[in-house]
Amino acid sequence: MRVIRLLVVVGLLASLTSGASVASAARGGVVRPVAECADLVRSFAIPGTRAHVTRAEPVAAGAEAAHCAVLGYVEPRVRFHLKLPTTTYTGRYLQYGCGGYCGALVSPSFPDCGAEIGGLAVAATDDGHVAGGPVPSADGTWAADDQAARDDLAFRAPHVVSMAAKRLIEDFYGAPPSFSYFGGCSNGGREALLLAQRYPHDFDGIVAGAPVNYQSPLLVYQAWLARTNTGADGRPVLTADRLPALHDAVMRHCDHLDGLVDGQIDDPRRCDHDPAALRCPTGVDGPTCLTPAQVDVVRRLYAGPTDAHGRRLYPAGQERGSEPAWAGWVVPIPEFGGSSLATLLADDYLRYMGYPMGTPHSSLAEFEFTAREFARLGVEGARGNAMSLDLGEFRRAGGRLILWHGWGDQGVPPRGLLDYYARLARHDGGDVRRWARVFMVPGLQHCTGGTGLTAFDPFPALLAWVERGTAPDRVVAVGRNAAGEVVRTRPVFPYPLTARYDGTGSIDDAANFRPAPPARPTRDAVDWVGTYLHRVPGPVAP
């Protein structure tokens, strides 16, 4: 099961002593606190608002490094959890994004960067509300009549928490962080891109994984996933028992296209498997085949949503190879009360979050897949969409951006990121790879898990890029088995390069792969009804 999750990771070399320069930080000294942990309990002003520390307590070394654990909130109620290392801090700050509709304050993890790199201050936030329901990250009821809470999630919370955290870091250590980083996946990836677009001076380096930056269009997509797989009787057409056979058929047809039969599809765009090949014979209906209605559903899932005139309502659909992860996200399961995550996300968004307060809302059952209804969602959606192509200020400030996506992502179609990156490159007017690079991970599902490869961590590469100017030319993804053991490593090269086996050694060893250009030129910008949203600016907090 894969509910939208936070990504946790990062670190790199260097540090600074109290009040020291960035140059001295790079020499590796540990920064010691100049204040007592308990002295941080107070209120203080930050631009446009106030922050309040309600608790600050020393935590002895144990499962984590010794640190000062700080809990507080930024008005009106953006809770944050900040951890300040007391013996290992090296002058760096890392802030995590949150998943889904947030609503839970997760304890931020210290990245395990080793003794050479040292410790980072880390923080996380709930984005300004407390969620409930069977799947809290899909709960939108809190947004029904609270515009402040909506705005915190949409565009404000990560920014104000960064200001509060940096102020506390300066008070505790005697100097602000030398480098500040942000990392997130899914909604956290949306926040990452939004920070680069609207708050270009908040962070030096940003990682945006599987970003929900086309937020309001993606909720149209979630509604379409749910409705596509719902029959006239209200029951799911495609059921979980059919997914293994469907995936096996796709892999038999397409696994070899990249030159290796290795259980993953390096570029699903080359795969043209038609689910009709799995159609059940007359009078047969079982888990090894698809009924005619199921064939139609699978075709529509691969194709993506359109209106009655054939206009695309999202620039992508489900990718071939992602089928195992449809259970839970597209196909209902008992763990979600017999529902699917797409159903829960879409229905709460349409009922409570997606339209301006005081205007007619909709629901999953009532939503019309039309350009008109798409535009109605875009009014409120522009507050949280991270679709701007103008990242010039972030680039000029020296910011570095790593975008990544799993090709097996069942929740956020990966071609949507390529559509954005193609438009960003065109808008930038130069070589966008000087400051922003994309990595597409074969087989990886939504943020984590997958077929073949199961995890991807680009943060060390980001820090080397920001602090040493070393642009990432490869990041190694890993595949783990059920016991958590690494059974595969594979390099992922900056898009559009792919990994090609050099013909010697294990295919599960990253050392045996080299970068290769795509088999054919890529055309990633898609003609769809939401392209105008790239020109709709969203609000910013002070």
Image (cartoon, helix red, strand yellow):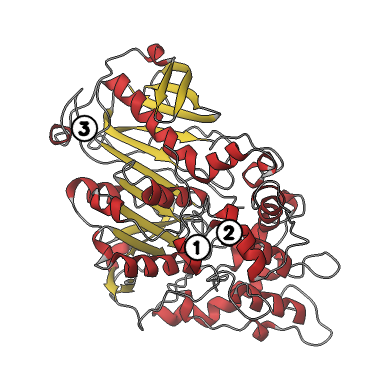
SS assignment at label 2 = helix
Give yes or no for contact between labels 1 and 2 (Cβ–Cβ under 8 Å).
Answer: yes
Q: CA distance from mark 1 to mark 2?
A: 8 Å
Query: Which mark is in front, 2 or 3?
Result: 2
Number of marks drawn: 3
User: Mark 2 or 3 closer to N-term?
Assistant: 3
Vertical comparison of 121 with 38: above or below: below
Q: Nearer the viewer, residue 356 or 466?
A: 356
SS assignment at label 3 = loop
Q: Which residue is mark 3?
A: 15
- Kindly tell me whether residue 499 is visible in this rendering: yes
Q: Give the left or right position of residue 249, taking residue 515 as reference.
A: right
Residue 131 location in percent, x, y? 65, 37
Vertical comparison of 267 with 119: above or below: below
Q: CA distance from mark 3 to mark 1?
A: 41 Å
Question: Could you tell me which residue is drawn at 76 percent across and 78 percent down?
Answer: 293
What residue type is disc 1 on? Leu
Q: Which residue is mark 2?
A: 378
Label annotation for residue 415: none
Give yes or no for contact between labels 3 and 1 (Cβ–Cβ under 8 Å).
Answer: no
Q: CA distance from mark 2 to mark 3?
A: 44 Å
| In the image, farthest residue toward the right | 233
Q: Quadrant of residue 117?
A: top left
Q: Give the left or right position of residue 449, taking residue 300 as reference.
A: left
Q: Which residue is mark 1?
A: 533
Residue 343 location in percent, x, y? 70, 57
Residue 143 location in percent, x, y? 65, 42
What residue type is disc 2 on? Gly
Q: Quadrant of the C terminus?
A: top left
